[in-house]
Amino acid sequence: MKTVLSLTLAALLGSAAARPIVVGSKLDPEAQLLGQMIVLTLRGAGLEVTDRTTLGDTGVNRKAILAGEIDVYPEYTGNAVYLFPQAKITPRQAGDPAVIFNLARQLDAKNGVTWLRPANVNNTWVIAVPQSLARAQNLGSVADLARYLKGGGRFKIAGSPEFFGRPDTMPAFEQAYGFRLRADQKLVLAGATPPQTQQAAAQGTSGVNAAMAYGTDGTLAALGLVALKDPRGAQAVYQPAPILRTATLKANPGIEALLNKTFATLTQATLQRLNAQVALEGRPAQEVARTYLRGQGLIK
């Protein structure tokens, strides 16, 4: 019986002699966590994996997967706006989870990249401010922030070069809400992750009183920050999904069911809790991922 099961698993996942599957990820805590979930899920199924998580930002991982330097990494559906500018994706399309996923999947197919099923969470870009500032200036949304800025309110936001430089991030907020930040209102931190920018806002580092953040960050409440709402839908829906080289999937077809099952267990509250364990408690992402996957019965 053991031999039969082994043969069945080998047929499902691909040849054991195939080269290792290389897993990448971005730098922030959630990216590390999701990358480790992919690593551990695949290893748990008996596949040989090379761990190259924390590889770099979106651009670095994107170049790596197109060049065949990595096989899979967790990406976000909303990044289709950034990755495929020629498609001219409308805000309405980007704000619909099913539409933006299907567009990303369709547009990347010609690049030899397959998008698997995303988790039912939204880790979109948000602007976060200290609760004290939000209360004092009645800031609950980016529309409120625009009013505050036009009235000459003091503002300085910490973020990464990607957050300030991509047209679908801070520039999209500016365009949708009719304001424009000056250079001295930005603290650009190379390689910055949301916990670092939020720490800067919470502590008032270099005059900072706002931060780049993500919707599933577990650090916001703990640091006394408020995520401003985006009533005009400047930001796309960002659902995390494993994306992988189509050639790798064809060689190992069982990967799709494995990773779909893992990502299907994730919720907004779950990711916030797990992210906090990495970002606030300082636990290694692999340790947090392993404990979670074992608790879900996904690995031994």
Image (cartoon, rainbow, N blue to C red):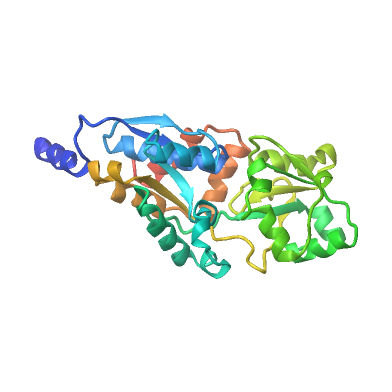
Could you tell whether 139 is left or right of 18 in the image?
Answer: right
Task: Give the quadrant of the N terminus.
Answer: top left
Give x and y (percent) for residue 12: 19, 44
Q: Residue furthest front?
A: 86
Does residue 121 appear anywhere in the picture? Answer: no
Observer-nearest of 86 and 268: 86
| Image-quadrant location for residue 18 | top left
Number of numbered labels in the structure image: 0
Name the residue at 45% across, 66% down. 99
Give x and y (percent) for residue 114: 35, 50
Could you tell whether 43 is left or right of 219 in the image?
Answer: left
Name the residue at 31% across, 46% down. 246
- Give the answer, above or below, for where 203 lies relative to 138: above
| Image-quadrant location for residue 140 | bottom right
Task: Give the quadrant of the C terminus.
Answer: top left
Give x and y (percent) for residue 219: 65, 45
Give x and y (percent) for residue 64: 44, 36
Observer-nearest of 198 and 85: 85
Name the residue at 68% across, 38% down. 196
Does residue 92 appear anywhere in the picture? Answer: yes
Name the residue at 81% across, 38% down. 205
Could you tell whether 103 is left or right of 132 in the image?
Answer: left
Could you tell whether 280 is left or right of 65 in the image?
Answer: right
